[in-house]
Image (tube, rainbow, N blue to C red):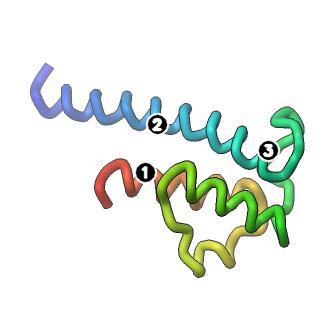
Amino acid sequence: MSPRKREDHWCDKNIVRLADSFNRDFTKIVAASMGIRQAFLNDDIMLSGEDLISAVSALEEEFGIDVGDEDYKSIQTIGDARDIVMDLVLQKAIGG
């Protein structure tokens, strides 16, 4: 395997691990912040008011990120939060 292919393979494996770990942690954090069981959490649930503030604050603290005002205002559902936070976590992981 060429050095470039090894590097790509390593990167792909680590991104998959990061994504798996992120999804587990994201679900635990959001469920806990909303006071619901993880089994009832799905991406279509609307986030607003205290649930939104609590979930985003907990996610920022856990992942060491800052959800900017523009992104924060665009969050309407758990799926929106998942997408935005995952993007920020990946950017942080790759040094962006």
Q: Position of residue 1 (x, y in %)?
A: 14, 19
Identify residue for label 2: 18
Q: Please state the horizontal and vertical placement of residue 11, each as a whole percent of the image.
A: 30, 35
Disc 2 marks a residue whose amino acid type is Leu
62 relative to 23, above or below: below
* Relative height, residue 11 to residue 68 (above, below): above
Quarter where residue 2 is shown: top left
Element type where label 1 sits in the image: helix
| Label placed on residue 31 | 3
**Marking on residue 45:** none
Q: Foreground residue, 35 or 40?
A: 35
Instruction: Inspect the image, locate mark 3, and give the three-letter code of the amino acid beneath it.
Output: Ala
Left or right: residue 3 compared with residue 22: left
Q: Nearer the viewer, residue 12 or 36?
A: 36
Badge 1: how crowded within 10 Å, few (<14), some, or many (20+)? Answer: some
Q: Residue at x 78, y 51 (%)?
A: 33
Label 2 element class: helix
Q: Which residue is mark 1?
A: 90
Q: Are the residues flagged by discs 2 and 1 in contact, CB closer than 8 Å? A: yes
Q: Using the numbered discs, state the Cα–Cα distance from disc 2 to disc 1 in whole angstroms.
A: 8 Å
**Callout 2: 10 Å neighbours few (<14), some, many (20+)?**
some
Q: Earlier in the sequence, mark 3 or mark 1?
A: 3
Answer left or right for 60 relative to 1. right
Find residue 39 and report its image quarter.
top right
Sooner in the amino-acid sequence: mark 2 or mark 1: 2
**Residue 7, image x and y in percent?**
20, 32
Mark 3–mark 1 distance (CA, rounded to whole Å): 22 Å
Q: Residue at x 67, y 62 (%)?
A: 56
Quadrant (top left, top right, bottom left, bottom right) of the C terminus: bottom left
Amino acid type of disc 1? Answer: Leu
Which residue is rendered at x = 49% and y = 57% of the image?
A: 87
Determine contact: label 3, label 1, CB under 8 Å: no
